[in-house]
Amino acid sequence: MIADLAPFLALASQAAREAGAFLAGRSEATQGIDKETGRDIKLAADRKAEALILSILNEGADLPVLAEESGASGALGGLYWVVDPLDGSANYNRGMPLSAVSIALMRDETPVLGAIYDIGSGELMSGGEGLPALLDGVPIRVSTVRETSRAILATGLPVMADYSAAALQAMAADFAAWKKVRMLGTATLAGAYVACGRVDRYAETGARLWDVAAAMAIARAAGGRAEISDGAPDAPRAILIDNGCLPD
């Protein structure tokens, strides 16, 4: 498996690094809002970073792609890429250092490898089936915390979240079981932080596959658990990534 997937991971890591460096530079090309609809925001940076990523992936491997900005190119079966060029667009737009580039390789419905570039810190997290989970080349593992009372939960309120009083009260009631709760504004980094032991569980309803596929693959390679509900490739889904030690 390593011989089969290692070149794909190297390609994904290259694309994530190059797009991340482009975004971190905050050049004139990354500035500007393309569209704002309700709570959603689309930046010129999203579009331009995606074009850069796709050029690198297409040159290195002729595979179909599901990308956040441009949708699906080719049939999404067998091996295909899933790309989020800039997760945490609202953070990025305001200059907050919590945003990331996420690239995953899927085999049918299973994320088999991922590369995530943290734009604020410059960290690259990667891993996959039969491949080690790494942070800048150093092996990482999920935490060993077993009690929610000692654990950190990462979650969020995605664009299509239920903001009703009842839904928010139910969320707050769940928060009481955890030692700490964090909302990072980026599903990609929330899942990746599980892989490197910074948080113990990431759970959210309404995440998209491109937000979490790479983090799922890396977390599994780091010894964790990653589950996503059924649905169309571009549909909102429920996601859970954790250390595999916590109670359900």
Image (cartoon, rainbow, N blue to C red):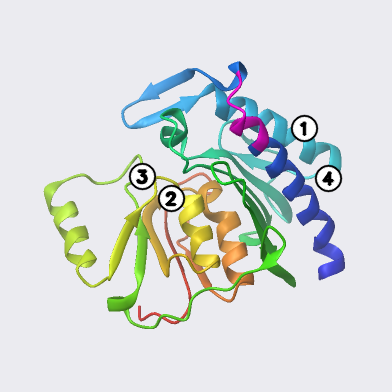
**Nearer-N-terminus badge (3/1):** 1
Question: Horizontal placement of 62 versus 175: left or right?
Answer: right
**Nearer-N-terminus badge (1/4):** 1
Residue 148 seen in the figure = yes
Query: Nearest the camera: 152 or 115?
Result: 152
**Nearer-N-terminus badge (2/1):** 1
Q: Which residue is mark 3?
A: 158
Q: Give the amino acid type for the residue marked by disc 4 in the picture.
A: Ala
From mark 3 to mark 1, how far is it between C-alphas? 29 Å
Determine whether label 1 and label 4 are within 8 Å by CB: no
Determine whether label 3 and label 2 are within 8 Å by CB: yes
Q: Which residue is mark 2?
A: 207
Disc 1 secondary structure class? helix
Which numbered dot is residue 55?
A: 1
Q: Which residue is mark 4?
A: 61
**Nearer-N-terminus badge (2/4):** 4
| Magenta stretch encompasses residue 50 | no
Disc 2 secondary structure class? strand
Please tell me which residue is depicted at 43% across the width and 50% down the height of the picture. Answer: 207
Please tell me which residue is depicted at 39% across the width and 45% down the height of the picture. Answer: 185
From mark 3 to mark 2, how far is it between C-alphas? 7 Å
Q: Residues within 10 Å of mark 2 (few under 14, many from 20)?
A: many
Q: Give the amino acid type for the residue marked by disc 2 in the picture.
A: Ala
Q: Residues within 10 Å of mark 4 (few under 14, many from 20)?
A: few
Image quadrant for the C terminus?
bottom left
Count the marks: how many? 4
Residues drawn in magenta: 21-27
Determine whether label 3 and label 1 are within 8 Å by CB: no
From mark 1 to mark 4, how far is it between C-alphas? 10 Å
Q: Give the amino acid type for the residue marked by disc 3 in the picture.
A: Pro
Task: Give above or below for 85 relative to 113.
Answer: above
Determine whether label 4 and label 3 are within 8 Å by CB: no
